[in-house]
Image (cartoon, rainbow, N blue to C red):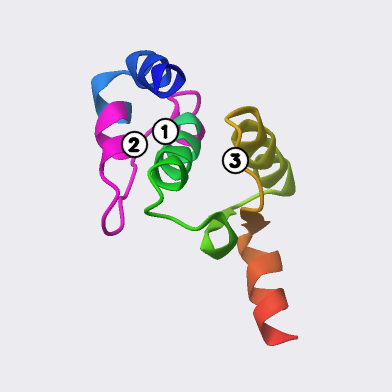
Amino acid sequence: MPGQRQTLDSLDDAQRAVVEALEGPVVIYAGAGSGKTRAITHRIANGCNSKIYDPQKVLAVTFTTRAADEMLLRLSALGIRNVATRTFHSAALRQLK
């Protein structure tokens, strides 16, 4: 897939490691503006494009509504639809209901 290769080529080594680690959890410790959201959204896209992840079974959780909305926009730009992006609060509230 040429578009996917180009996308991976645009990532730095640490981001690429996150994107290519499709099994198990990944923890990303990094400061503001370091590309955490980019790495996470590209990992989800890579997993969905590889058919390892079912987009309808992915839950991307973050701290703020703004960040959740941004993740959804970035996933959409990568051609990924039907991924749930929520804040910790909204994800927990949804499970309680």
Pick the front one: 97 or 10: 10
Q: Is disc 1 placed on a helix, strand or loop?
A: helix
Q: What residue type is labelled 3?
A: Ile
Are the residues at dot 2 and dot 1 in contact (C-beta closer than 8 Å)?
A: yes
- Seen at 64% across and 28% down, the residue is 77
Can you give x and y, in whole percent of width and height, for residue 22 in the image? 30, 49
Along the polypeptide, which appears first: circle 3 or circle 2? Answer: 2
Q: What element carries label 2?
A: helix
Front in this rendered view, residue 56 or 43: 56
Q: Give the range drawn in magenta.
A: 16-37
The answer to whether 44 is drawn above or below residue 13 in the figure is: below
The answer to whether residue 26 is magenta is: yes
Report x, y in % for residue 29: 33, 41
Q: How crowded is mark 1: few (under 14 residues within 10 Å), some or many (20 or more)?
A: many
Q: Which amino acid does label 1 sit on?
A: Ala
Which residue carries the number 2 mark? 19
- Mark 3 touching mark 1, by CB under 8 A? no
Nearer to us of marks 2 and 1 is 2
SS at badge 3: loop
Specify the quadrant that holds the C terminus: bottom right
From what the image shows, is residue 54 above or below residue 91? above
Cα distance in 3D space between marks 3 and 2 = 15 Å
Q: Name the residue under label 3.
A: 80
Alpha carbon distance from label 2 to label 1: 6 Å
